Image: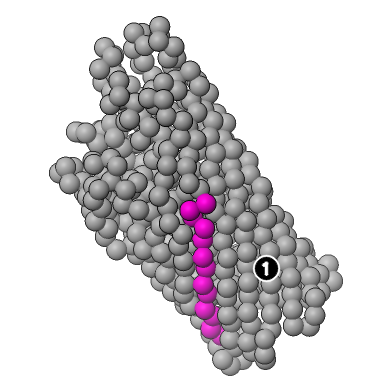
């Protein structure tokens, strides 16, 4: 019973670790313009996605603006376990989207913005026919979806100082599917565990832009943590009847919570010439704010061997990078950027569900702007050096991890 209880604790805790890892990895910017200057966007971004990225920037938008973003992500994720097994994610394509709207109230002095985006997320799918010990140790399907509604207001304090405040109204949906071996209780060796939880959270953020000298700008963005309270259900198929008299049931409630950490970001922008602009960004994320994970599964709580939470060892992390913009003429603009994102997931609690390492993002983009419409396209390569993990709580997760993404981002702008 202890072996099965420990196994289930790992399954549930690693599933929720996926959600935190999505924040730790910092999903790349969702607009093509922001991705094009990925490491230098806080002081220089001028599209409507500034509502969420650097809200004081929306004062630069002079007319009502609608921005629609879509992207194609392709992942190459592979895990070679020290046990001799190898698995590769079998659903490598992801298609995120977002939308932003900015309405100047007093152009250049007071503006309102609203965004609907999916800033954090993870979809990990491995073959159901994985053999050997990983068949039970690794969830074959884990999916986290977040939707963030971000209203923001920006106003000019002085000619050189702008301030903005906004809200993060966040919805999250978490799903897990995992095989479980009931043979130790006289049941099927291929039972199926399914966990589904949903919840809402509320946070706030603020931004300040300061023109420190002609052609020189500083931007500061601070974000409070967002706590999500999950409520849902836990289901176990093919549960042996021998467990019923002990109080176990094929379904029960599921309750937990998790916190997307707060952050502080600083950006510097410099107009080298009327056509050429550079930016440099630094961001600190308080990942350690989420120390432990409550695990409440109602009548099936005893499956966890009396445990009510799982402890994680996440570390705070930093991002830093640069971005450059060159305006060819009134209509066309070229962009390029680089971002380094520090990994905060320790080897002790590492999992193939959310493989991570220090991340390097390289991007190139182009944009066209007409009188009322604009189109931007950016390609980005997200490189994670192969990581060698040893000493994980689950020994089967020791091994080599390869994790790369290629991203093509497309944005459409309509001004009114």
Whether residue 27 is visible here, answered yes or no, is no
Extreme residue in the front direction: 306
Residue at coordinates 39% horizontally, 40% vertically from top-left? 14
Give how far across and how far down residue 337 sits, in percent: 46, 75
Q: Is residue 179 above or below residue 340?
A: above
Q: Name the residue at 41% across, 34% down.
A: 12
Residue 75 lies, in percent from the top left, at: 36, 54
Residue 388, image quadrant? bottom left
Magenta region? 277-289
Q: Is residue 374 left or right of residue 302?
A: right
Q: Position of residue 187 (x, y in %)?
A: 28, 14
Q: Nearer the viewer, residue 404 or 210?
A: 210
| Nearer to us in this view, 242 or 214 | 242
Where 216 falls versus 369 (above or below)?
below
Residue 326: percent from left, percent from top: 53, 85
Tell me the quarter of the image containing the C terminus: bottom right
Q: Which residue is mark 1?
A: 207
Judging from the image, the colouring scheme is one colour
Quarter placement of the N terminus: top left
What secondary structure is marked by label 1? Answer: strand
Q: Nearer the viewer, residue 321 or 283?
A: 283
Point 52% across, 78% down: residue:
280
The residue at 57%/68% (across/down) is 265
Q: Is residue 288 magenta?
A: yes
Characterize the local packing of mark 1: few (<14), some (14-19) or many (20 or more) Cα atoms within 10 angstroms.
many
**Which of the 4 image quarters holds residue 57?**
bottom right
Query: On screen, 297 above or below 317?
Result: above
Who is closer to the viewer here, 341 or 395? 395
Residue pushed farthest right? 106
């Amino acid at each position: 019973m202890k072996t099965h209880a420990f196994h289930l604790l790992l399954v549930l805790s690693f599933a929720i670790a996926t959600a935190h890892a999505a924040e730790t990895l910092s999903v790349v910017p969702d607009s093509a313009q922001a991705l094009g200057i990925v490491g230098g966007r806080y002081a220089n971004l001028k599209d409507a996605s500034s509502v969420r990225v650097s809200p004081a920037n929306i004062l630069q938008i002079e007319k009502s603006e609608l921005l629609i973003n879509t992207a194609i992500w392709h992942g190459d994720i592979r895990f070679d376990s020290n046990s001799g097994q190898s698995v590769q994610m079998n659903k490598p394509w992801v298609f995120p989207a977002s939308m932003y709207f900015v309405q100047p109230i007093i152009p250049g002095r007071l503006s309102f913005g609203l965004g609907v985006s999916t800033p954090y997320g993870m979809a990990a799918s491995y073959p159901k026919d994985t053999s050997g010990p990983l068949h039970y140790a690794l969830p074959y399907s884990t999916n986290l979806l977040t939707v963030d509604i971000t209203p923001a207001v920006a106003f000019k304090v002085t000619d050189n100082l702008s301030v903005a405040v906004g809200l993060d109204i966040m919805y999250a949906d978490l799903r897990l599917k995992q095989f479980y071996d009931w043979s130790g209780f006289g049941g099927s060796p291929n039972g199926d565990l399914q966990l589904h939880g949903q919840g809402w959270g509320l946070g706030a953020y603020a931004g300040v832009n300061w023109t420190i000298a002609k052609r020189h700008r500083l931007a500061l963005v601070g974000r409070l943590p967002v706590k999500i309270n999950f409520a849902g259900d836990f289901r176990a198929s093919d549960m042996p009847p021998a467990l019923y008299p002990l109080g176990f049931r094929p379904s029960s409630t599921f309750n937990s919570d998790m916190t997307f950490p707060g952050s502080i970001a600083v950006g510097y922008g410099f107009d080298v010439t009327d056509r050429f602009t550079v930016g440099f960004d630094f961001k600190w994320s308080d990942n350690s704010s989420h120390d432990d994970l409550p695990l409440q599964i109602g009548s099936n709580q005893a499956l966890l061997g009396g445990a009510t939470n799982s402890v994680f060892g996440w570390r705070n992390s930093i991002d830093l990078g640069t971005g450059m913009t060159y305006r060819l003429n009134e209509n066309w603009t070229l962009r390029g950027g680089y971002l380094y994102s520090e990994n905060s997931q320790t080897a002790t609690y590492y999992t193939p569900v959310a493989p991570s390492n220090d991340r390097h993002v390289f991007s190139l983009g182009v944009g066209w702007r007409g009188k009322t419409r604009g189109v931007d396209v950016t390609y980005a390569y997200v490189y994670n050096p192969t990581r060698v993990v040893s000493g994980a709580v689950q020994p089967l997760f020791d091994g080599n991890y390869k994790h790369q993404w290629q991203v093509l981002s497309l944005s459409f702008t309509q001004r009114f």
